[in-house]
Amino acid sequence: MHLAQQLILTLPPDRRSLALEDGPAVVDDGAVRVPAGATQGFAAYFSAFPTSYWVRWAGVAAVRLEVDVTGAGTVRLVRSDARGTAVVVATSPVDGRGSVALEVDVSGGSDGGWLWFEVDAGDGGAVVTDGRWLVDVAPRRTGDVCLSITTMDKPEFCVATLRRVASSEALRAAVGTVFVVDQGTRRLVDHPDYPEVAAALGDQLTVIEQRNLGGSGGFSRGMLETLDRDGADAVLILDDDVEVEPEALLRAIRFHRAARQPVVVGGHMLDLNRPTVLNSFSEVVHERDFNWGPPEASQQWHDLAAAPLRDTSWLHARGESDFNGWWMCLVPTAVLRDVGLSLPLFLKWDDAEFGLRARDAGHATVSFPGAALWHVAWTEKDDTVEWQAYVHVRNRIIAALLHARRPRAGLLLASLLATDLKLLLGMRYYPVDLHVRALRDLLAGPGDLHAGLGDVVPASRAVGAAYPETTVYRPGDPVFDGALARRWTAPVRPKPTSVGALVGLTLRGLTRNLRRAPGGMPRSALSRDQATWWEVPEHDSVLVLAGDGASGTWLRHDRRRVWRLAGATVTAHLRLAVRWDAVSRRWRAAAPALAAPATWRATFSRATVAAHDAAHGRHQRPVEHH
């Protein structure tokens, strides 16, 4: 039998429910102590075994549980099916030997189901010190897996991740080179703790500095460096603002090595600020409006403490994914050689587009339970109304032009146009301007996206200089203090759901935009929760507070802008709808070259020299710190 998964028993108190079910056990010095006469369950995210994934993708037929346990009592092995119905499949007494082994035939269980165990403590209690799940399939791949972290101005996170990697002998044995692609101005090598982690990792660590090419440029650099390493057969990419257990990375690596065919192995994302909340179990691109998300909206941001594995039936069905977020994702080199690297999209939709491209070439993405990390969630800030509005729309449509299976990507254009009209009614003019520019750029064709990577951020931000709504007000400013004194205290209006209510909201908004803009200060202030798309249009001039309430943006209607932008966005959407097939053919023809390793190699050659010149003066050698 071959190791598939070590138990993760020691987690901080606010994450304990990911290792143990709610019960009487006490975690002490890395051991789980079960009091006499009590029962402790291990049907938890990091302790249970996702059987169906191993059966489906690795052809596993038998699984063995080995538990290191002392004292007296009984260990029960429990198996669930795809509906979450659980039965005991094996038991063993705890008789002081220090180890218990239980084995079960799992063949035919590819649709869903987990394995977990329970401990009944006898007189004197029982102590679980370790455990592991083993499978009857040997590794089919033995090459190195390179670890690649892309970072921008988050050296503290990177140092912490590197320290965790260095602390795990097993992970270091499985990983070849550890790359850090540093695209920021707060350089990793300047962090005071960098020498410590660099010494610990030695020749395994390579830091590459390049100008900011966005997530797609950073992740593609790690992919290309891996392709260039003899003996490497996969790259495991990580975002920078994460916390991760080494064992979680090892689970992805072991699964990759055991899979019958090369598959993209994605890690789940847990919310760093709400550490038991799972972003999604799997992610797909919905063809109806070509937008990404979980298969069912109710499965987003699931709290595993409030609704644990044993009690949540949908968690037991094996998930099917179109792609996995690049906060943690293992990509085999066989896939990279077949489909190329990321498209040069800077950020947003680069991971989804790559997953769809791999899918279309016959390479599956498996979002793998138990291989997970904690990532800073994006829900605290709405980047769809800032400079990133440009890449949100441009890249979503690029992905649709390349991969949509419905004519004109279903309701995509109608959905985007409706969003623009809501933004205009809500006095958000800047993102609509960016959306119009994105549509025009798409109609113009691919051009040279690589050459424009460095211009995405400054160009988008430059547009915002013309819009007062981009100004941020803080305490002490008369605008902020005056609006806060008139803070809106009435209940938020109910969300309009009927056609009549939507028509009424639209007519009231249009009527306001026929009048002159109000003068003076904001007439009220709304919290972020109050500032819904249907509440803001009911105001003429309002300060919308950030999530923490420590700053705000002043929204006020501008009748000239609203009508100009409304006409521009309707025209741009109609032009793209009419020319969709022709535009799609142009983008599909250009995509292979845009994602090709050779194209990226030329881009990186320019980017590393630029970064080196900025940091060290003009030199010929690329910036690599070993």
Image (spheres, rainbow, N blue to C red):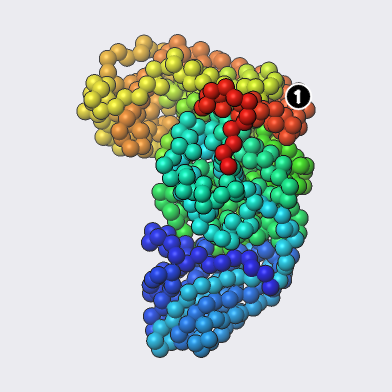
Q: Nearer the viewer, residue 567 or 331?
A: 331
Residue 87 visible in the displayed image:
no
* Residue 139 position in % (x across, y down): 72, 63
Residue 189 visible in the displayed image:
yes
- Under circle 1, the secondary element is helix
- Judged left or right of residue 339, residue 172 is left
Find disc 1 in the rendering and name its residue. 586
Q: Which of 427 and 319 is in front in this view?
A: 319
* Residue 130 position in % (x across, y down): 51, 72
- Judged left or right of residue 17, residue 603 is right
Residue at 59 percent of width and 25 percent of height: 619
* Residue 145 position in % (x across, y down): 66, 52
Residue at 27 percent of width and 25 percent of height: 480
Amino acid type of the residue tagged 1 in the rendering = Arg
Residue at 23 percent of width and 25 percent of height: 476
**The C terminus sits in image quarter:** top right
Q: Which of 240 and 404 is in front in this view?
A: 240
- Judged left or right of residue 112, residue 138 is right
